Amino acid sequence: MRSFAFHPGPTLLAGSGQLEAFIARMPAGPCLLVSDRDVVRLGLPDHCRDELTRTGRDIVLFDAVEADPSRATLLAAVELGRSAQVTSVIGFGGGSPMDVAKLAAYLLGSGDDLDAIWGVDVAKGQRLPLALVPTTAGTGSETTPISVITCEGGVKLAVNARPLVADVALLDPELTIGLPRHVTAATGIDAIVHAVEAYTSARLKNPVSDALAREALRLLTANLVTACDRPNDLEARGAMLLGAHLAGLAFSNAPVAGVHALAYPLGGLHHLPHGLSNALMLRPVLEHNAEAARELYAELAPIIDPGCEGSGTQGRVRSLIDELERLCIETGLKLRLRDHGIPQGDTPLLAREAMKQTRLLVNNPCEITEVDAQRLYEAAW
């Protein structure tokens, strides 16, 4: 056995009826509840807020988190938590509220300066107690040590450090009922990309992350279309939540790569949802990687298309790429940049911005140069 390290995620509570046990793990005192206005408007946190109140905890609500949360939003959440002297933080919603909650809990607990902790394993302080509740099945943010924040010029910066891992996460499929189809689709594709990129990561890939990635891919690809077509199907919703969580565990140990690197500028500059951005760049990047990652792609293909088992390696690689694209299309996602108002003339700028994602590009199975990136954006246009 070759040497490797694997870092587990938070304590996991999965299924309906776990809220009381979840709240019981939080300390006494005021709690900063981080969410967004849509989640609050839908009433999804109401039961959690009622339980916090019933157990004598004051709730300090911050619901101003936007998609691709900004530095200003993060610092506003920290300031609110500091002024209320909160003793814990709960992130409730999609990846954006959870990312803000993770980094707010860290900054409130450690007192560190934000600009001093960007990067991998720079943040080493003590955060406040932290709990996370995903309401989408995609980002896996409830299990990762990563928080991504949009800074000046649309550049996305990240803190990736073990203190950001939550104490506890709650996976309740009932909280994902009522999600719009396009959100279910985009977040599901995001989770699928997490699994594929973790399995093929050029750095830190290991047998445990591989096993999690494979099971995540099985759960996600088998249930995504059902979750879109039958949005009240709790079994499919639960499978998607678990698949996204397992994919999050996988990529928090074997980090994601080229698809995410090229997706980030689409979010930062054009404000496309992160999952949609991944779907747009999925086929071009997989085709770019097809030779370097062919054995690994061939291993994954039968999970999605059991009928390709008897094909040769190249046939299985083609099957993986085609089946992933088919899934995107069946969910209703439009897979051309021009479908989302992005001018073809923006491809050079997008390529330059993608080159700033060095922490992701280094994990890709083969090099992606700026020339490559522009070609891949043009292929997606």
Image (tube, rainbow, N blue to C red):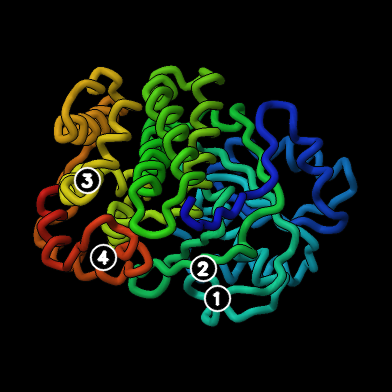
Residue picked out by circle 3: 286
Q: Are marks 2 and 1 in contact (CB under 8 Å)?
A: yes
Q: Are marks 4 and 2 in contact (CB under 8 Å)?
A: no
> Which residue occupies the foreground of this view, 217 or 166?
217
Residue picked out by circle 2: 159
Question: Whole-percent x and y of residue 25?
Answer: 81, 47
Residue 173 at least partly seen? yes
What residue is at 27 percent from the left and 55 percent from the top?
365
Residue picked out by circle 4: 354
Question: Does label 4 or label 1 sit earlier along the sequence?
Answer: 1
Question: Does label 3 or label 4 sit earlier along the sequence?
Answer: 3
Does residue 19 sit above or below 235 in this rendering? below
Gap between marks 2 and 1 measured at Cα:
8 Å
Mark 3 neighbour density, 10 Å: few (under 14) some (14–19) many (20 or more): many
Amino acid tagged 2: Val
What residue is at 51 percent from the left and 44 percent from the top?
208
Mark 1 neighbour density, 10 Å: few (under 14) some (14–19) many (20 or more): few
Gap between marks 4 and 1 measured at Cα:
23 Å
